[in-house]
Image: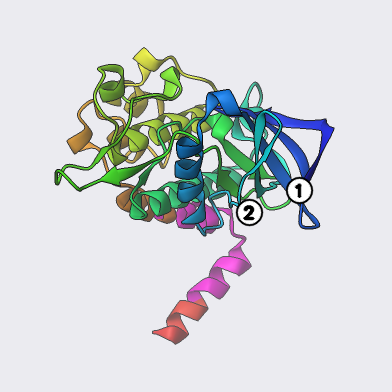
């Protein structure tokens, strides 16, 4: 495994990322100082990655390698930029592109939750957007935890609460263990920021405020329901994906020309 030190890609929760190669393929090499992550933690992170095969979640390309005082982890390289760089300070995305990115993020998070994984650190900087296709890919699973059902039926995660303060759900701020619904809150804030084209203060992310600010948006009945203060009142990601799909379909129909719309009606008529 090689990497080129002049291509710095970014920084994750535990280390930096550089462009490199793994078995002849371009890769994002995550470099973690050994003193920041012991071998047990590294194995946990790689167990998380190894389970995942979804187009909206970054892939692990191979096992970690120890070199001098660093661990090197080969990950799928996404040719694009972070959602943060794409949206802020100025956003030129079309409505259809926003829908595509939002749906991709939501599908990726739904997949993680179905695999009993809580990401714990969702934020615009942890979503890559591919330049050519606008495919959204969730990255940096360094804080992700498997949901532990061994001692309880409650969907709690093991380990301490960490992650980015500005995108942490209210229960995480209160020192409680994060669950799937904590991720839902974080994703709701990310989506709201994409739609409003601005970073929001944590205290402003209330159901009431978001509903008011998105009242003319097709997401007005979705995002506020992801940002409830009480986790049990938040939507599941399965429900969010279904609702976002309906928004994307509505946007697509709205953008159609008259001939395209007539053709669509004819297809549905003959199918019927």
* Residue 62, numbered circle: 2
Marks 1/2: CA–CA distance: 10 Å
Q: 57 or 259, which is in the foreground?
A: 57
Q: Position of residue 66 (x, y in %)?
A: 66, 39
Could you say whether the residue bearing mark 1 is in a helix, strand or loop? loop
Disc 1 vs disc 2: Cβ atoms closer than 8 Å? yes
Q: Which residues are magenta?
A: 246-265
Q: Describe residue 103's horizontal placement relative to residue 150 as left or right.
A: right
Q: Is residue 247 visible?
A: no
Tell me which residue sits at (54%, 37%) in the image: 140
Please tell me in which quadrant of the rendered image residue 170 appears.
top left
Name, please, the residue furthest toward the front: 68
Q: Describe residue 244's horizontal placement relative to residue 171 as left or right.
A: right
Q: Describe residue 229's horizontal placement relative to residue 67 as left or right.
A: left
* Residue 1, numbered circle: 1
48 lies above or below 11 = below
- Label 1 vs 2, first from the N-terminus: 1
Q: 217 or 138, which is in the foreground?
A: 138
């Amino acid at each position: 495994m090689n990497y080129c030190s002049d291509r710095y890609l970014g920084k994750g929760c535990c280390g930096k990322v550089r462009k490199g190669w793994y078995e002849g393929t371009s890769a994002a090499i995550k470099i973690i100082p050994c003193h920041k992550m012991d071998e047990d933690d590294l194995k946990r992170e790689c167990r998380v990655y190894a389970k995942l095969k979804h187009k909206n979640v970054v892939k692990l390309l191979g096992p970690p390698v120890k070199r001098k005082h660093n661990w090197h982890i080969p990950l799928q390289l996404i040719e694009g930029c972070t959602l943060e760089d794409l949206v802020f300070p100025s956003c030129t995305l079309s409505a259809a592109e926003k829908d595509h990115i939002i749906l991709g993020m939501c599908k990726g998070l739904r997949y993680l939750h179905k695999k009993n994984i809580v990401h714990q650190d969702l934020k615009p900087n942890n979503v890559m957007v591919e330049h050519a296709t606008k495919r959204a890919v969730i990255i940096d699973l360094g804080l992700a935890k498997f949901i532990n059902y061994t001692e309880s039926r409650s969907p709690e995660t093991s380990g301490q609460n960490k992650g980015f303060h500005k995108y942490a759900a209210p229960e995480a701020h209160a020192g409680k263990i994060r669950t799937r619904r904590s991720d839902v809150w974080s994703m709701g804030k990310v989506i709201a920021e994409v739609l409003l084209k601005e970073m929001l203060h944590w205290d402003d992310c209330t159901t009431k405020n978001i509903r008011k600010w998105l009242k003319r948006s097709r997401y007005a009945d979705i995002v506020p329901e992801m940002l409830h203060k009480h986790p049990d009142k938040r939507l599941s990601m399965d429900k969010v994906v279904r609702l976002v799909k309906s928004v994307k379909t509505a946007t697509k129909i709205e953008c159609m020309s008259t001939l395209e719309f007539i053709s669509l009606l004819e297809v549905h008529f003959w199918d019927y």
